[in-house]
């Protein structure tokens, strides 16, 4: 089975459409790692696209905040403005769909799992270094787990010896690349963000997993971020949310 993995769409219709077009014909099922909404100007369109494609979609912290299910006390002012705007925009139908989502996914039959943030704290924790990756490796029951939330495309891997994880290695993947999957290692992979990258590369990111070929590739592609920025400004959202798209920050 071939999976298209996307994460942190954040209401960026232009990023998501470009990814779906680029990956067309190369996957059987979409997995979305959450944060479908928040920041961008097209929350309903992004929900609808994923629903139309019957995506296996996870709940992200911005989705939960837009639903009013978690506090936005710790969100910064621009994120808060975007959440309050998104709450007003979401259709009852898309709200119900978001409400049905969970922050973790067990795809054991295909040999992988997925989480929005980390397995220790599925909606909150940022896996930004090996010390934070370690507990998620400890909780993984699959050889491969996808995560999002940081908006940074990268990969941690840990040697598996009798169920214990050793010798962690890290590789940033800002411009994508193929990952060699070796049987004795466990992999924690972030495909990067398709709607608001933060690793210095403004390109939209996604991953393709082929569970039969045991191949995994992260892709980076140009998309019309100017259109996404203009839509943010036209919607009356904080302009900085549009400008950052061109910087990948
Ligand atoms: Zn996010």
Image: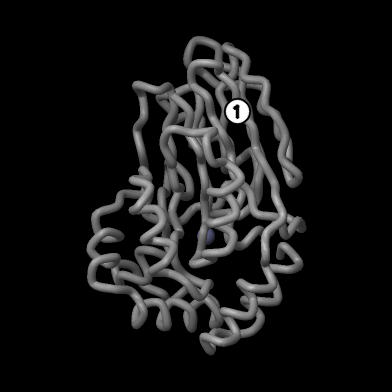
Name the foreground residue: 73 vs 246. 246
Name the foreground residue: 138 vs 193. 193
Quadrant including the C terminus: bottom right
Residue at horizontal 52 percent and vertical 47 percent from the top = 6
User: Residue 5 location in percent, x, y?
Assistant: 51, 41
Residue 64 horizontal side relative to residue 174, left or right: left
Under circle 1, the secondary element is strand
Above or below for 78 versus 71:
below
Residue at horizontal 43 percent and vertical 77 percent from the top = 83
Above or below for 95 versus 231:
above
How many numbered markers are drawn?
A: 1
Residue 116 horizontal side relative to residue 152, left or right: left
**Colour scheme employed for the rendering of this structure:** one colour
Dividing the picture into quarters, in which one does residue 237 lie?
Answer: bottom right
Dividing the picture into quarters, in which one does residue 223 lie?
Answer: bottom right
Above or below for 195 versus 234:
above
User: Residue 133 location in percent, x, y?
Assistant: 57, 38
Q: In this figure, which residue is indicated by the disc labeled 1?
A: 216
Residue 158 horizontal side relative to residue 36, left or right: right
Name the foreground residue: 65 vs 225. 225
Mark 1 beta carbon near ligand 1 (under 8 Å): no
Above or below for 226 versus 29:
below
Quadrant including the N terminus: top left
Dividing the picture into quarters, in which one does residue 47 lie?
Answer: bottom left
Near mark 1 (Cα within 10 A), the count class, few <14, some 14-19 or many ≥20, is some
Residue at horizontal 23 percent and vertical 72 percent from the top = 92
User: Residue 74 location in percent, x, y?
Assistant: 47, 73
User: Residue 59 location in percent, x, y?
Assistant: 37, 54
Residue at horizontal 53 percent and vertical 72 percent from the top = 40
């Amino acid at each position: 089975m071939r999976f298209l993995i996307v994460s942190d769409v954040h209401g960026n219709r232009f990023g998501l459409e470009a990814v779906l077009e680029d990956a067309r014909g190369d996957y059987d099922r979409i997995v979305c790692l959450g944060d479908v909404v928040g920041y961008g100007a097209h929350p309903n369109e992004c929900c609808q696209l994923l629903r139309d494609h019957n995506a296996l979609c996870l709940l992200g912290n911005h989705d939960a905040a837009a639903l009013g299910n978690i506090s936005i006390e710790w969100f910064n002012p621009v994120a808060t403005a975007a959440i309050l705007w998104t709450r007003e925009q979401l259709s009852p139908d898309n709200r119900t769909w978001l409400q049905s989502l969970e922050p973790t996914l067990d795809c054991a039959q295909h040999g992988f799992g997925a989480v929005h943030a980390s397995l220790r704290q599925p909606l909150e924790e940022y896996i930004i270094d090996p010390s934070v990756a370690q507990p998620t490796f400890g909780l993984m029951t699959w050889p491969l787990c996808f995560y999002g939330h940081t908006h940074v495309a990268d990969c941690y891997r840990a040697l598996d010896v009798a169920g214990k994880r050793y010798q962690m290695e890290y590789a940033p993947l800002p411009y994508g690349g193929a990952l060699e999957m070796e049987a004795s290692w466990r992999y924690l992979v972030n495909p990067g963000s398709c709607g608001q990258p933060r690793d210095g590369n403004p390109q939209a990111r996604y991953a393709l997993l082929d569970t039969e070929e045991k191949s995994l590739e992260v892709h980076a592609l140009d998309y019309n971020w100017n259109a996404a920025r203009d839509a943010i400004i036209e919607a009356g959202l904080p302009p900085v949310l549009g400008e950052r798209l061109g910087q990948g920050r």
